[in-house]
Image (cartoon, rainbow, N blue to C red):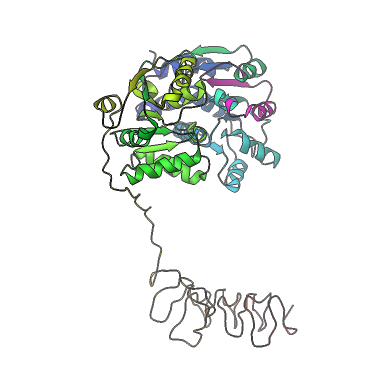
Amino acid sequence: MPAFDSLGLPKDIVEELAKNGVTTPFPIQAATIPDAIEGRDVLGCGRTGSGKTLAFGLPVLMRCSERRAAANRPRALILVPTRELAHQVRDSLRDYARVVGVRVGDVVGGSSYTRQINELRRGVDVLVATPGRLTDLIEQGACDLGDVEVSVLDEADQMCDMGFMPQVTELLDQVRPDGQTLLFSATLDGDVDKLVRRYMNEPRTHSVDPPVSQVTTMEHHLLKVLPRDKNKIVTLIAARDGRTLLFVRSKYRADTISEQLAEAGVPSASLHGGKTQSVRTRTLAKFREGKIQALVATDVAARGIHVDGIDMVVNVDLPTGHKDYLHRGGRTARAGASGSVVSLVAPNQRRMARRLLGDAGIEPKQHLVNPGDELLSEVTGAQEPSWEPWIEPPEPVRERRGRGGPRRGGYRGNGGGYRGGYRGEGGGYRGDRRNDRGDGGYRGERRGGERSEGGYGGDRRNDRGEGGYRGDRPEGGYGGDRRGGGPRGGFRGDRRGGGPRRGERFDSAPR
């Protein structure tokens, strides 16, 4: 196998690879990197975990290191089917992008529009994106693909299976027609073939694995179980030593089984499209770090799970088709490691299961098992959990401290209340008091003073201050800007003593 320095990569990238312990390229990398560097269209066929990210990512970084991208106009586009995969690709490339001076950004659903728009405005050389959010930003005028010289479709078959084909074609129609296209997929049929014919020019094809095959380091088992035993068997398998990924058919099932495992003492969590992106990201991080032992996921959420060290995938619910079975199984036995795929089937599902695995080109080992069987332990490593409920430790909270001690929050009632001021003897100042009135304002309650009914929340300058009262004074609190002795703006409080109400001004107020 050739070394990375013989593939045409620059010295800085080769040194960074070595620093990260990457010295020998995977077959897909050795096959595709030279062609991609030469500017040829490349069609890479290989299973998940075969090293495709660096295979297309390193040549893209080389191409973009020649000059910087203009605002809102990336020079390279990497389209992926899921948010998780987008983050995976972005994080995998950032170390190498830094050494060649290339900016890598991401545009995905579930994240802040503002952050992504600002990032594009500053200039992104390589943009990793999901089709839906990128289409939104283009329609808003925040991104233009007219400068894109190289386009990458990663997990192209998944994007087509998930219904992104119309958006993908619309996006590819906007890039430079003379640009380079790199397409990587586990299968090359159906819509993927249409993409190849429409957008690729005499592509160099490299297939390191047959498009549909079982990995030699992966074992497949079909466990025949009785419906009444299924939940118990799932729990025993999840309690095994190692990192286990369990697939179910719905969000409700994912949450229910995750709770069932936690009640039995198995550190677990669920992952599905009903969770926010920040929660999904934190959950995956905990699974990757080993804080969670079992992850219960749906197909849509799990398509982007790229976590090393998953040594068992369990199909609690059978997938709907053989492609989904292959995608699920691709989460284990990654990059040459070994792993097992276990499918639980009831008596009335056996015929369907055999047909599904047959379509996937797989001949599983079949076993009839019951809870507590030695055979179950031999095949899956199943063991008894603690049966003491597992409670996830709370996230550490960084304590905010002021000069007078910790800030505690507080009341916001009629009396003005505490707004989180310092816990000193007399309430406490929130701002710095300068001159005779101060350039800050009281945020807490001043117990020892004469203004105990609230506190100033504005910036008090001159003789009365600019800002206004934040508390609710019995006669009402000013919310406007008080400069020359009269209020400017509207009142925040309700003046109960007969004065003007919210939004009114004194006639004597300066204009």
Tell me the residue at 30%/33% (across/down).
Answer: 242
Residue 330 visible at all: no
Which of the 4 image quadrants contains residue 148?
A: top right
Which of the 4 image quadrants contains residue 240?
A: top left
Q: Is residue 239 left or right of residue 447?
A: left
**Residue 115 belongs to magenta span:** no
The magenta stretch is 161-190
Q: Is residue 276 left or right of residue 331?
A: right
Residue 386 to residue 394: above or below: above
Q: Nearer the viewer, residue 192 or 354?
A: 354
Residue 302 visible at all: yes
Q: Nearer the viewer, residue 247 or 459?
A: 247
Where is the N terminus found, in terms of image quarters?
top left
Q: What percent of the width, then of the height, locates residue 137?
A: 65, 40
Residue 482 to residue 239: above or below: below
Q: What percent of the width, then of the height, locates residue 410?
A: 46, 71
Q: Is residue 260 left or right of residue 148?
A: left
Q: Is residue 315 left or right of residue 232?
A: right
Which of the 4 image quadrants contains residue 366?
A: top left
Q: What percent of the width, then of the height, locates residue 43?
A: 55, 16
Residue 155 to residue 259: above or below: above
Q: Nearer the viewer, residue 15 or 378?
A: 378
Where is the C terminus found, in terms of image quarters?
bottom right
Q: Nearer the viewer, residue 38 or 168?
A: 168
